[in-house]
Amino acid sequence: MEKYKICPSCKTKNEPTFLECLNCEADLTRVKITDEETEKMLKANEAEEPNSQTSSVRVCECGVKNPPNARKCRICYEDISDITPTPDTVDQGKTLFVLSSLDGQYVFKMTSNEITIGRESAMNEYLSTKSYVSRAHAKLYLEAEQLYIENLSNTNFTYINNKKITGKVKLEDGSEIGLGGTNVSGKSQADAAYFLVRIDQCM
């Protein structure tokens, strides 16, 4: 029976001698060699005890959670191979904060206590084409079940409900965030980014 290693990050089957995943380059040095029969038995055990395992993550400095064997952050692509995996501590009872783009194309869930957002930071998959947004434009904070934002840009700034902010500002349900621009006469600037803050819901 064919033996192989299953990548814990992308689930690709690799040759049993491989030390890195052929697909995502995840570390396979501690991954056990298995086969189809063993895999079926493990899946049957997991079905009987669905809560028996606690998932682990590698949390990048940008705040994004990555699979425990990932070598690079999936958002900012920083090297995270030296970060020790920790248990995923998302509490189901916690308030969920969501940033929903006004164009309806993007939704971002706040999953860490502190995240930097920008063209080359978290949310870059949406912000990378917004030239008015800085590489590290603003920082989001979760403190005592409240969400705050702080401007980091010295060029195009951050606006809450069309007002330029200084320092750390508390965000409410329905607050409108403008990264790099404001709404002028009801029209938004195409090269800026705009979001609505939602609490315990998603637009």
Image (cartoon, rainbow, N blue to C red):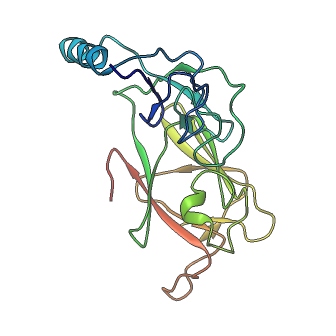
Whole-percent x and y of residue 96? Answer: 39, 40
Which residue is at the front of the view, 40 or 121? 40
Which residue is at the front of the view, 130 or 162? 130
Whole-percent x and y of residue 167? Answer: 72, 51
In the picture, which quadrant includes the N terminus?
top left
Which residue is at the front of the view, 27 or 103? 27
Report the residue at 40% width, 25% height from top: 91
Report the residue at 53% width, 42% height from top: 23
Is 126 above or below relative to 1?
A: below
Whole-percent x and y of residue 110? Answer: 49, 43
Which residue is at the front of the view, 103 or 1? 1
Is 70 above or below relative to 128?
A: above
In the displayed image of the protein, which residue is found farthest to the bottom? 185
The tally of labels here is: 0
* Left-right relation of 7 to 134: left
Is 190 above or below relative to 176?
A: below
Whole-percent x and y of residue 155? Answer: 79, 70
In the displayed image of the protein, which residue is found farthest to the right? 154
In the picture, which quadrant includes the C terminus?
bottom left
Report the residue at 69% width, 36% height from top: 61
Say which quarter of the image contains residue 94.
top left
* Left-right relation of 168 to 23: right
Is 101 above or below relative to 111?
A: below
Report the residue at 61% width, 74% height from top: 192
